[in-house]
Amino acid sequence: MNIFSSNEKDVPPKEYIGGKAYNLFLLKTKEFTVPNFIVLSSKLINHLLFDVIKINKKELEDIFQNKSQDIALEQLKKVRQKIKDSNISHRIELQLQLAIKDLSSERIILRSSALNEDGDLASFAGIYESKVTNKNTKSILEFLKDILANSFSDRVYLYSSWRDVRQIPKISIIIQEFVEGSVSGVMFTSVKKGEHSGLLINANKGLASSVVQGHHSESYFFPKNKGEKKKSGACLNNQQQLLLVKIGNQIEKFFKKPQDIEWTIKDPKIYILQSRPITAEFSKNVRVWDNSNIAESYSGIVLPLTCSFARDIYKVAYTDLARHSGVSLQKLREYEEVFENLLGFFYGRFYYNILNWYKMLTLFPGYERNKQNLDRMISLKSRAELDEEFIKNVSNIFKLYYYGLVSVKYLTFNKKINKFKEDVKKYYRKVRKINFSEKDSRELLDLYYEITKELLSKWYLTLENDFAAMTFYGMLNKFCGKNKIRKENILRLVSRIHNVISATQIKKLKDLSEKFSQYSELQKLAHGKMYKICHDKIFTDNKYIDLKAEIKNYLQIYGGRFAAELRLESEDMDSNPEYIIRLLVLYSKNVSKNESKRERDVEIKLPIHKKIKLNYIIKNTKKYIKQREELRLLRSQAFSLIRKVFNEIGHRLQTQGVIDNWSDIFYLEIGEVKNYIEGDSTIQSLKDIVSLRKTDYKTYRNIEMELTFITEGSPYSYVSTVNKEFKTKYGELIKGEGCSSGIVKGKVKILKEFQLPDKEKFEIIVTKNTDPGWTPLFGLCKGFIVEQGGLLSHAAIVSREVQMPCVIGVKDATKILNDGQIVTINGFTGEIKLGK
């Protein structure tokens, strides 16, 4: 038999239907509430693959068993394409039409069910795909091919290799009634939290996928043998909590082992969507990698010089933060490895080593609160928890000392941070006057040491400011949650921060462009794209002395701000003086008028004592957010000095024949450059290192990475990549997280990287992520859609201040939307309507 129905009394053999379907059948036999389903057996799937689509079975086996990784991934790409191009309807359509009559809902979900999935030893959870569609044969067949193709994705191959499962995936397909629950989530029937073992429920409004994918959710923990402990929450009432606990315990008892259960509630029923064994605990070498926030600072491919510099900065700055927070030198020595490994680097991309960040937080009191605030601030997409042994890290004596120290710091922080800002600006102006071209490699290296000493020794203050912003924003969210203040009102509360540096940059550009537009000769040169000539004329002809002075003033403040400003390999204003002229031309002819519709401010009604508390929290949240933006600008200026040093060292090494081109220095790590100049390098041929890394980096650009993934053992034994092929259908509405005011309609412009408009201005910019160097674009468009980021990300802050609609966290937006497509975005709700 090729298709099995959940209405059948007998449970089919596991080898025919895979682990997930087998577990669902077993749950059905015990009368748990499971949505009805049918299963296309592995026998039928194999028939489609090898007899109908004509995939060569022997070659496929060879790919999984013998081929090198690069060859295997290339050949699997061809397999996927062959599946997608095939026509399988004539072989299965009639059987499918008859089988889906057993399903009563109009919407269905297709899930893979592999023999190696949801097993006891190694869960392949999340490696295979699911698709939701309408219950018609044509749609089902189309998505069936997508799931079959995904069964041979790079992720499946790499994960199988990591788990040493070297065989063709044995796949069956579940087609199940889709239950659109009001509350959904996962529960783990046996977890350890502190000294207690118990059942953990994670719940969220809407579909279970929001919890499975790691979005913030409510947690309910029920210790075993402690009675019926209930917790108040917005998602689950007491009766629902206790019923879930009862069902979870029954399922664990039935399977005779702890279970990881997905569920959804569609009143009054609780549906079980799937259940799998909780796999053995990860070893101590497990690592969780997350790119959600760091991509705002280091997006895309980053070269080794920047990588090594950033790694050192993170270590020094966060160690200093802990030291100035009262953490003992002995404890800092114990945690040295943690501070050294806050970042990871995969295929040229930066990732946070999340568990090390959590370990670092355990050095301070209030771990759970700080963890939640950090997750919110960096828009974390992964879910991870530390072992209890790490969390119990702070003595009561240290708590008293720490909170006393924080109180003193709070009273003196304004004075200290203002002095820091003035010192950085003063030092920046001093170093900018140095003639770098007159210095040799040794002198330039000494200058690098001096810059890092002068600036990095106090950089922990910027982290204290981040900590304060994170804490007050967390307090604001908690206050609003308790007092039932709607999310769109929270956005209003943190908007209109007076004189945010990024918003003033846009205003400064507008004013400067008006001045520039008064000179017809300059306008003619710039419109003819003779930007270099135009720039030189301004800086050499006394006729433009006033304009020159204003441009110099702008560059003194914002000269370090440009796209990818923290990458040392990026081209800055010194090496690309034409950039400022291009900006002035665009702003003089093309500054977007704000066309969004806005709602009026809403007066939040609260008792006077609560209003006083709210105003205090808002005032401090805004203060530290504003300061954070100023400090980021100072950071970009500090990086510009380091960039200038290494640009010059690169020229010296090229002159000496050590490297072929001055820019090759970016393919070396700082330690390698330092050791070569100091005379203690173990490798004399830096050209060989550069050549090897250039070869590697060519392959990196063809690899697309997951935002989050987990490794066990050696981090490079399994790295999760994304299949670049993207084929899915969306309705008229997609959703992200609204982070600013207004509604606006316009044409989409997809930007894979920073780009200024040429002739036609941008309307709705759609991109993966932004960094502070994208600020000028906010004055040259009507709205933003960003795949990554949170409510404290740069895009969110700037869009609120210039009152431009912006939606963040829109997964795959750059793939779903197309250039020129008309969309309407709602900056409050996060809704994006497709079409006119």
Image: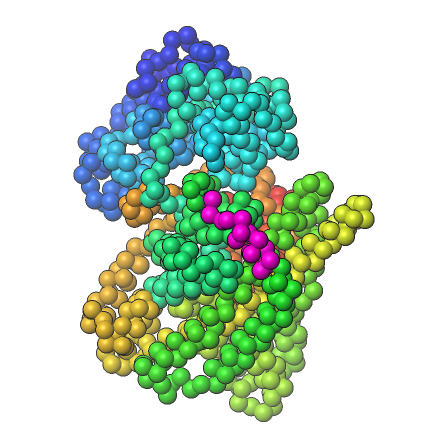
Using residue 128 as the reference point, say whether residue 776 is left or right of it.
right
Identify the residue at horizontal 53%, vertical 28% (top origin): 222
Q: Is residue 643 above or below residue 436?
A: above
Side of 362 where 43 appears, left or right: left
Residue that protrudes farthest toward the front in the picture: 397
Q: Which stretch did the figure color magenta?
A: 391-406
The answer to which quarter of the image holds residue 607 is top right
Q: Where residue 122 appears, x then y in whole percent?
A: 32, 31
Along the horizontal axis of the image, is 156 left or right of 96?
left
Q: Main secondary structure of the magenta part?
A: helix
> As drawn, which residue projects farthest toward the top?
9
Instruction: Give the percent coordinates (x, y) of residue 589.
Output: 62, 70
Nearest to the observer: residue 590 or residue 406: 406
Residue drawn at (44%, 20%) of the image? 252
Task: Mark yes or no: residue 823 visible.
Answer: no
Q: Quadrant of the C terminus?
A: top right
The answer to whether residue 834 is left or right of residue 453 is right
Residue in the image at 36% along x and 64% along y = 308
Q: Is residue 793 above or below residue 444?
A: above
Above/below status of 330 relative to 640: above
**To which quarter of the image does residue 253 belong?**
top left
Residue 495 location in percent, x, y? Answer: 68, 56
Q: Quadrant of residue 594?
A: bottom right
Q: Give the image location of residue 58, x and y in percent.
A: 19, 31
Residue 87 included in the magenta stretch of the image? no
Residue 611 in sight: yes
In-front residue for pair 186/60: 186
Q: Nearer the viewer, residue 687 or 389?
A: 389
Residue drawn 39% across the image and 18% down it: 256
